[in-house]
Image (cartoon, helix red, strand yellow):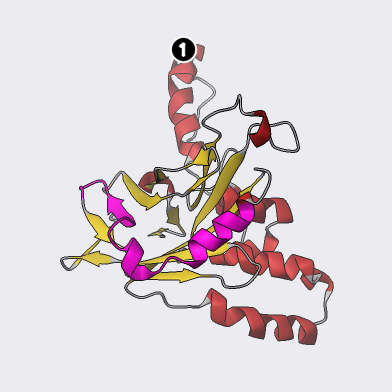
Amino acid sequence: MKFSPSVSVRNLCRALPLLVLLLSSVPGAPGADFWEKKEYGEWSEKDCRKMLQDSPWAEKYETTSIDVNRADETASDAAPPYVRYWVQLRSALPVRQAIVRQTQIANNYDKLSAEQKQAIDQQTDSFLKTDYGDYVVVYITYETNSPRNALTQLVRHWQTQNTDRLKFSVFLGGSKGEKVPLEQYVVSQSAEQFIQFVFPRKVNGRELLEPEDKNLILEFPVPAVGSVGGGTAFVEFKTKDMTYNGKLEY
């Protein structure tokens, strides 16, 4: 916007809100998120953690003790016991880019020779370029500060679940009211604590999530561990924030 020297103070004040609006829409403008300002190869470790834990494609779901007066259930850090689930839309490109960037940082990628970078790229490119096609993949890790054998109970619970058991209680839904049932369940059988839900991306021939939809909601049952948890988790992703490089990513 161009102002002539003759513009009055009053007219300038009237024009400022429009100027601020225009500047806020420019990529890289102050206030934009880091994924709008920088290519993923420039993301810091802090950027990656935010993308994977607190971004439009990653949310936290936490349950706390339902009876904080039970002394035998008090966590070792004196905080109320909790079970925490970190939920990622793993099929969303920026999430996979954050994982790849973490791998680069861990290997001092930016300081490596071209040949060394190429070796790492060969290991990460297939993951980064995975075509999820007609599927939405939700990846979840979990943790707890609850005492005794709480973590062991959690691991045992999720490792004994399967697709047939969960397909009537795990759903992915949009703001139009559709509830898509689980198509495949994957769980770690090792020490790594993760579960993975796979859903079809289309419902009756149309995308489950479209730009005009308000949200995407994951619904899944959470087990009770001692006095913690139980019931159904609802995790919401806001559609308006999920555009990445001009594309709705999920």
Q: Is residue 95 visible?
A: no
Residue 195 vs residue 104, the one in the foreground = 195
Compared with 91, 113 (above or below) is below
Extreme residue in the top direction: 10
Residue 49 vs residue 41, the one in the foreground = 49
- Give the residue drawn at x 51%, y 67%: 159
Q: Position of residue 137 (x, y in %)?
A: 42, 66
Bounds of the magenta segment: 151-177
- Give the residue drawn at x 65%, y 83%: 123
Residue 105 vs residue 39, the one in the foreground = 105
Q: Where does label 1 land, which residue?
A: 10
Q: Is residue 139 visible?
A: yes
Q: Position of residue 189 (x, y in %)?
A: 57, 73
Q: Position of residue 162 (x, y in %)?
A: 40, 69
Q: Is residue 171 magenta?
A: yes
Q: Secondary structure at mark 1?
A: helix
Instruction: Locate the C terminus and report the quarter of the image it occupies.
Output: bottom left
Q: Is residue 173 magenta?
A: yes
Q: Give the quarter of the image for residue 114.
A: bottom right
Extreme residue in the left direction: 204
- Give the residue drawn at x 34%, y 57%: 170
Residue 2 vs residue 236, the one in the foreground = 236
Figure label count: 1
